[in-house]
Amino acid sequence: MTPAVVISGLHKRFGDLEVLKGIDAEVQPGEVVCVIGPSGSGKSTLLRCVNLLEVPEEGTVVVNGVELTHRDVDIDAARRSVGMVFQQFNLFPHLTVLENLTIAQRTVLGRGKAAADGVARENLERVGLAEREGSYPAKLSGGQQQRVAIARALSMDPQVMLFDEPTSALDPELVGEVLAVMRSLADDGMTMLVVTHEMQFAREVADKVLFMDGGHVVEQGPAAQVVGDPQHERTKLFLSRVLNPNHLE
Amino acid sequence: MTQPRARMSPRKRKLYVQVAAYAVFVLAVLGLVLFADWGAVGEYFLDLDVAANAFPKIITVALKNTVIYTLSAYVVGFVIGLVVALMRLSSIAVYRAVALVYIEVFRGLPALVVFLIFGFGLPVAFPGLVFPFEQYGTVAVALGLVAAAYMAETFRAGIQAVPKGQMEAARSLGMPYTRAMRSIVVPQALRVVIPPLTNELILLFKDSSLVFVLGVTAFTTELSKFGGDLAATYADSTPLVLAGAMYLVITVPLGYLVRRLEAKQGRAR
């Protein structure tokens, strides 16, 4: 089976600052991979390189056998197979929920109105917001907005879903509903690459966890191993701080 | 230690200041009423017989032309301004440079100079050059080009006010840059720039009075020129007062509209 995502030798610089210093990683079809690590470790940048929102200086990203980093690749076409969910939701505020889900289907995939509406309603159902299709994003709670954003990405029938800290901008009591949707996606066999600070989610849902620090992947392996029994000092320190935030060593 | 002399309480002090302010105002009005020559003012600025002669042409010709000049220039300025703004934000350096030069030149030149160049410079240099709709076309282009420079900067600010995440979200859904601009970014930017663009309309309305330098006929005249000509004929300023009132009839409601829109946006934020 070809891997869904293969990242090799990835380097990314912002001016003098080297954010990614040679990343290698793989995601198998149907796998959920969580990327954890301290702020500034490069995990969001890594995710953004996977759909070329950031263009890496060196290295390759291959999604479903297509090398996105190749200069002859039509990047707009390639992005269609990769859905992305942002920390700040980024719903289109001037469009209704339904229009948020259909505009790219119609303009990019060329679907007719009926077909696009059908796909959109199916995905709204999936995230439990079927009754809000006529609302504008500003009328929704943060959790609802993020669920719409997930449904919007799903409406393009992606083969891989990227999540960039999808619950970090949410009020604590709204985190659960978004994680529940992500969990059900994982159960349905969606291939997911998730940058997150939710350790419990990583431990319970992820097949594999990557721990990043300082632009390197320090440790990777099965979730239970990396989160439950980390081998590297840096990983142990990070996890002990995250899991016991009130404990000062 | 002796207590310092009791000072006036702040409340009392405020009351005295207010009374003094009103007294100054009342005295100024009284002075104006008592010493101004109201007979002369009435005769030279509000002469009803002269005013009657201004109608109906002040509306059917002058006001109509002013509105046509303004709106046609506004449409030209809107379209060119949006294009220049998008060029200004382009990833292609040449487009950015052209847009910047355009904005600097047309914003820096007095509108009067642009009118003179379009009215007399260009026709002499290129004898074959003819604008459609005669004078109306010349005005729409000349005034429109000036307006476009200001509107371009407004559009640019509006587009940049749309959060970067909007473009990223659109691109991540596979939309090409131009489609994302057209369907996602520009519609949001337009909402932000409606109040400043309405202000631009008010400015343009007044600038349309510069048309007189092109030389206008009885059919293409506009408010200022019409009022001025009539004032000269009767040696009486009443037509100018009327023309001024016509401008205000349009600009004051527009100004009110801008304040309403701004207040609404302020609440939405």
Image (cartoon, coloured by chain):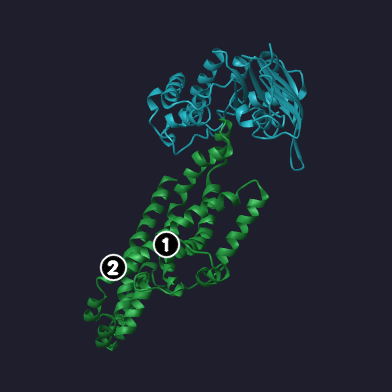
Chain colours: A cyan, B green
The residue where tag 2 is placed is B59
Residue B111 sits above or below residue B269 on the image: below
Whole-percent x, y for residue B97 in the image: 65, 55
Tell me the tag on residue B133.
1
Near-viewer residue (B264 or B131): B131
Residue drawn at the location 37% of the way across and 73% of the way down: B217
Instruction: Name the mark nearer the viewer: 2 or 1.
Output: 1
Residue A125 sits above or below residue A164 on the image: above
Residue drawn at the location 54% of the way across and 38% of the way down: B180
Number of other residues with Cα within 10 Å of mark 1, as a class: few under 14, some 14 to 19, many 20 or more: few
Number of other residues with Cα within 10 Å of mark 2, as a class: few under 14, some 14 to 19, many 20 or more: some
Near-viewer residue (A146 or B77): B77
| Residue A239 appearing in the image | yes
Whole-percent x, y for residue A225 in the image: 70, 14
Residue B41 sits above or below residue B203 on the image: below
Near-viewer residue (A45 or B267): A45
On screen, residue A133 versus residue A239, left or right, reads left
Whole-percent x, y for residue B47 in the image: 24, 81
Residue drawn at the location 31% of the way across and 68% of the way down: B61
| Residue A173 appearing in the image | no
Which amino acid type is marked by label 1?
Phe
Query: Does dot 2 land on a helix, a strand or a loop?
Result: helix
Chain of the residue that carries numbered disc 2 in the rendered image: B
Choose the circle earlier in sequence order: 2 or 1.
Answer: 2
C-alpha separation, residue under disc 2 versus residue under disc 1: 21 Å
On screen, residue B142 versus residue B258, left or right, reads right
Tell if the residue under mark 2 belongs to the same chain as the one under mark 1. yes
